[in-house]
Image: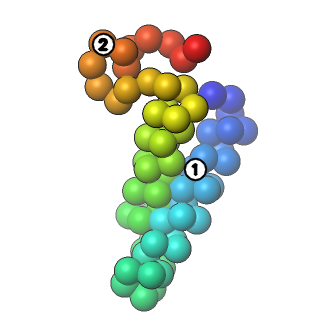
Amino acid sequence: MSIPATIALGIGGSIIGGIVARVLIGTTGGFLFAFLGALLLLILYRHFVQHRPLTGPGSKRPPA
């Protein structure tokens, strides 16, 4: 993944985390929800775009 794509994934994750925090607890969640949102986007990117599992032997292979 390129550097701009990594930056976009982090920013998108923080936005998603902020929205989820606003819905669940009524205030902005700060760093924790931003981190969790970015982590969720990374997992989804790895699964649906790169078609790689998170664990096991297939997780070590380079993306196609």
Q: Is residue 35 above or below residue 61?
A: below
As drawn, the residue found furthest toward the bottom would be 26
C-beta proximity under 8 Å, tags 2 and 1:
no
Q: Is residue 11 above or below residue 17?
A: above
**Secondary structure beneath disc 1?**
helix
Residue located 44% across and 11% down the image: 61
Residue located 52% across and 35% down the image: 48
Residue 10: horizontal and vertical position, in percent?
Answer: 57, 50
Mark 1: amino acid: Gly
Left or right for 14, reference 25 = right
Residue located 44% across and 50% down the image: 40
Quadrant in which residue 21 is drawn = bottom left
As drawn, the residue found furthest toward the right would be 4
**Secondary structure beneath disc 2?**
helix
Mark 2: amino acid: Pro
Residue located 40% across and 56% down the image: 36
Q: Nearer the viewer, residue 4 or 16?
A: 16
The tag on residue 57 is 2
Quadrant in which residue 30 is drawn = bottom left
Badge 2 or badge 1: first in the primary sequence: 1
User: Which quadrant of the figure contains the N terminus?
Assistant: top right
Q: Is residue 28 above or below residue 44?
A: below
Residue indicated by mark 1: 10
Residue 14: horizontal and vertical position, in percent?
Answer: 54, 61
For disc 2, the neighbor class at 10 Å (few under 14, some 14 to 19, many from 20) is few
User: Which quadrant of the figure contains the C terminus?
Assistant: top right
Q: Is residue 58 above or below residue 55?
A: above
- Give how far apart the Cα atoms at labels 2 and 1 are: 26 Å
Q: Nearer the viewer, mark 2 or mark 1?
A: 2
Left or right for 7, reference 27 = right
